[in-house]
Amino acid sequence: MSKKKSADNIEEKLKRLEEITNTLEDSDTNLENSLELFEEGVKLSKECFSILEKAELKVTTLKKDLSKLNNLVEE
């Protein structure tokens, strides 16, 4: 997956989460639809969290690599 695709993907997921939140806050939605939207929101939240965890891991790895490189340069 390309970097742009990944960024778009999380942005789309967050946008959909915002739509779901707004719909649920309107309270004009029946119970069945509200439950479906809530379930979709939970799924999207998990997916976003996973994307962010992977990004954090990558940043951590890159920082360690940079630190090792800096140590080599200083020697």
Image (cartoon, rainbow, N blue to C red):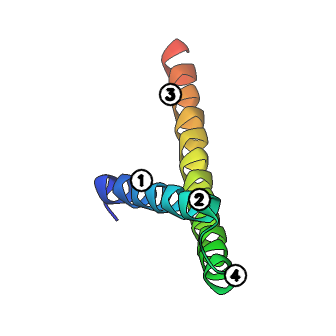
Name which residue lies at 61% across and 40% down.
Answer: 60
Label 2: few (<14), some (14–19) or many (≥20) C-alpha neighbours in 10 Å: some
Q: Nearer the viewer, mark 4 or mark 3?
A: 4
Do labels 1 and 4 touch, CB within 8 Å?
A: no
Q: Quadrant of residue 43?
A: bottom right
Q: Which residue is mark 4?
A: 31
Q: Nearer the viewer, mark 3 or mark 2?
A: 2
Q: CA distance from mark 3 to mark 2?
A: 45 Å
Label 4: few (<14), some (14–19) or many (≥20) C-alpha neighbours in 10 Å: few
In the image, residue 31 sits, relative to residue 70, either above or below, namely below
Q: Which mark is residue 66?
A: none
Q: CA distance from mark 1 to mark 4?
A: 28 Å
* First in sequence: mark 3 vs mark 1: 1
Element type at mark 1: helix
Q: Which residue is mark 3?
A: 69
Query: Which amino acid type corresponds to the residue marked 3 in the rendered image?
Result: Leu
Element type at mark 2: helix
Q: Nearer the viewer, mark 1 or mark 4?
A: 4
19 displayed left or right of 53: left
Q: Nearer the viewer, residue 20 or 6?
A: 20
Label 1: few (<14), some (14–19) or many (≥20) C-alpha neighbours in 10 Å: few
* First in sequence: mark 4 vs mark 3: 4
Element type at mark 4: helix
